[in-house]
Image (cartoon, rainbow, N blue to C red):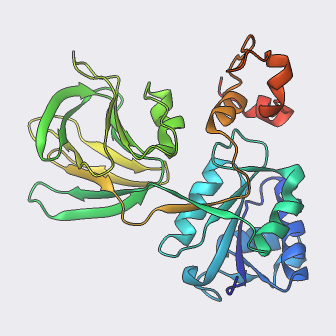
Amino acid sequence: MNARNILIVAHAHREDTVQAAARIVSIIRGQGARPVFAAEDRAALAGIAPGFADVAVLGDDVSPDDVAVAISLGGDGTILRAAELVRGGTAPILGINMGHVGFLAEIERDDMDDAVHRVLAGDFDVEERLALSVKVRDKSGEIAYETWALNEASIEKDARERMIELVIEIDGRPLSTFGADGCVVATPTGSTAYSFSAGGPVIWPTVEAIAVVPLSAHALFARPLVVGPDHAVAVEVQAGGLASGVLWCDGRRSHPLPVGARVSIRRSEDPVRLARLHHAAFTDRLVRKFQLPVHGWRGPTGTMMTEAVSIIPPVTTADREGAPQ
């Protein structure tokens, strides 16, 4: 690859993550490339180990446009942060799971060295994931806030004691009005996150679609919806309602939604890119991450499950500790 700037996204609050970051910095330098940290990460890590103090800083020494690959050490939340840091550039993200459920993280810590060497050699594929473009307009129709999301945009009530009154719109036409705790608009990537816990469907990553999932709605028609990727979804906080709300994107970026606010959501022109070293079936990922029971499966040719179990990686202690309860 031409650019040799490798962004490492890691928090300093876990000893194993710090050790992994130090190991990756050593490998990157040994291959003649340049490790890069976000300013806050370098400051935190340098306070623990002096070897991090001279690592290049994203934004000061290296532009996001000049990052070749981002390596995320953690769970899906760290990958979402990495996506924020490289947004606007073209760098794909390689997720190395450090003991969380990690739907987006492809590599386990035991395979870290080989994965980093392959990334430095350019031996990976790039998978593009649909992202959302999100705009908030005020009562007058002026854009008050604009952002994006990889997992979901959620419109939520901001006061525990009352529901928020919402109007759901698809392609400029009203669909339903109801009182609720809120509404989640999710991508296929986010379909195993907040949307899933709210009763939304799991959408295969290869399916381009947008899910609309009401949260605890008081309505006869408040089922999750799945629309095509080029449809426009809008959620209005009813002008005649009493409760305001708040917009959250990926649980990381927020903006207040006063009564009368309108949130417009559609496919972003800029997808999020993931670096993939393997082509594992998404079915196997669901089984492993959610510990789904598959005993008794015989397979399309009648092969007993015990003979075909090799296609499903064993559940590790890390998976068990990070699995949803």
Q: Where is residue 47 in the image (x, y as percent from the top left)?
A: 82, 71
Residue at image x 85%, y 58%? Answer: 112
Q: Quadrant of residue 67?
A: bottom right
Question: What is the total number of numbered labels drawn onto the structure image?
Answer: 0
The picture places residue 294, in percent across and down from the top left corner, at: 71, 17
Most distant residue in the front direction: 301
Q: Name, please, the residue furthest toward the top.
A: 296
Q: Is residue 4 above or below residue 7?
A: below
Indicate left or right for 228 with 173 as reference: right
The residue lying toward the viewer, choosing from 11 and 160, is: 11
**Left or right side of 317 for 87:** left
* Residue 323 point in image, percent of width and height: 70, 30
Q: Residue at x 85, y 32 (%)?
A: 317
For residue 29, above or below residue 261 = below
274, 76: nearer the viewer: 274
- Residue 199: x and y in percent read 44, 24
Seen at 84% across and 51% down, the residue is: 109
Q: In this view, does 61 lie to the left or right of 109?
A: left
Which quarter of the figure is the N terminus placed in? bottom right
Q: Would residue 233 be seen by someone viewing this image from the given angle?
A: yes
Image-quadrant location for residue 240:
top left
Q: Residue 173 or 43: which is nearer the viewer?
A: 173
Depicted 40 relative to depicted 229: above or below: below
Which of the 4 image quarters holds residue 34?
bottom right
Query: Which quadrant: the C terminus?
Result: top right
Residue 48 visible, this orientation: no
